[in-house]
Amino acid sequence: MSANTDAPRAPGADWSAFAATPTVRSHMDAEVKTLGPDVDVFAAVNFLLDHNLPGAPVVDASNMLVGMISQKDLLKLLSAGTGGEPVTGRVSDFMTRNVISIPPKMDIYYAAGMLIKHPFRSLPVVEGGHLLGLLTRRNVLRAVRSRLRAMLDASAS
């Protein structure tokens, strides 16, 4: 019995290029700006603002993922102060520790479902505990656009 693919088929179109589902590794950002857990919290605020980032992975000296720090996490600074005293602390004091990460071989469409289900803008890509990259909503949209464009081009030929 042959597998049923729901993709539209044009006579003579070569659909073999679409047999393999794209993976996270082929669409993730491999160069990721990270922070260490001991970075001063105000330096982390500056880091996110200077690099126009919604958040960043937090890694130790061995590039092991230990958390994520987001703009939302850092907004806790506003509620942590008392009587006008400046809040001090480290990234580890404000970061999210229980991070949902994904493997590089994961189907990108499954990862897209995770980004829909959870409020995250990105998912760290981890293998053996080490950070390999970051998959963002934007990465997934680019993958979808590329695949749809290729399918339309193949059906037109």
Image: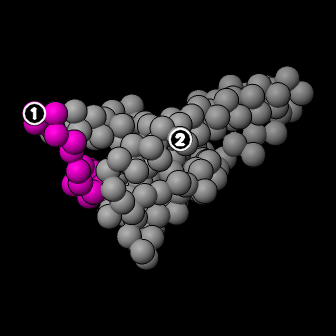
Residue shown at the point (45%, 70%) measured from the top left: 63
The reply to whether residue 140 is visible in this rendering is no
Which residue has dot 1 on it?
A: 83
Q: Which of 122 and 22 is in front in this view?
A: 122
Most frequent secondary structure within the magenta stretch: loop
Residue shown at the point (71%, 34%) measured from the top left: 146
Residue shown at the point (35%, 47%) measured from the top left: 42
Residue 50 is labelled as 2
Look at the image and tell me in which quarter the C terminus lies: top right
In the picture as drawn, the residue positioned furthest to the bottom comes out as 62
Q: Nearer the viewer, residue 25 or 83?
A: 83
Q: Is residue 70 magenta?
A: no
- Dot 2: element: helix
Residue 53 is labelled as none
As measured in the structure, the alpha-carbon distance from the residue carrying label 2 to the one carrying label 1 is: 28 Å
CB-based contact (under 8 Å), mark 2 and mark 1: no
In the picture as drawn, the residue positioned furthest to the right comes out as 157
Q: Which amino acid does label 1 sit on?
A: Gly
Q: Which of 141 and 96 is in front in this view?
A: 96
Q: Nearer the viewer, mark 2 or mark 1?
A: 1
Q: In this view, does 52 lie to the left or right of 54?
A: right
Q: Does the magenta stretch include residue 96?
A: yes
In the picture as drawn, the residue positioned furthest to the left comes out as 83
- Dot 1: element: loop
Q: x, y percentage for residue 56?
A: 43, 49
Q: x, y percentage for residue 41?
A: 32, 50
Quadrant hosting residue 150: top right
Q: What residue type is labelled 2?
A: Asp
The magenta region covers: 81-99
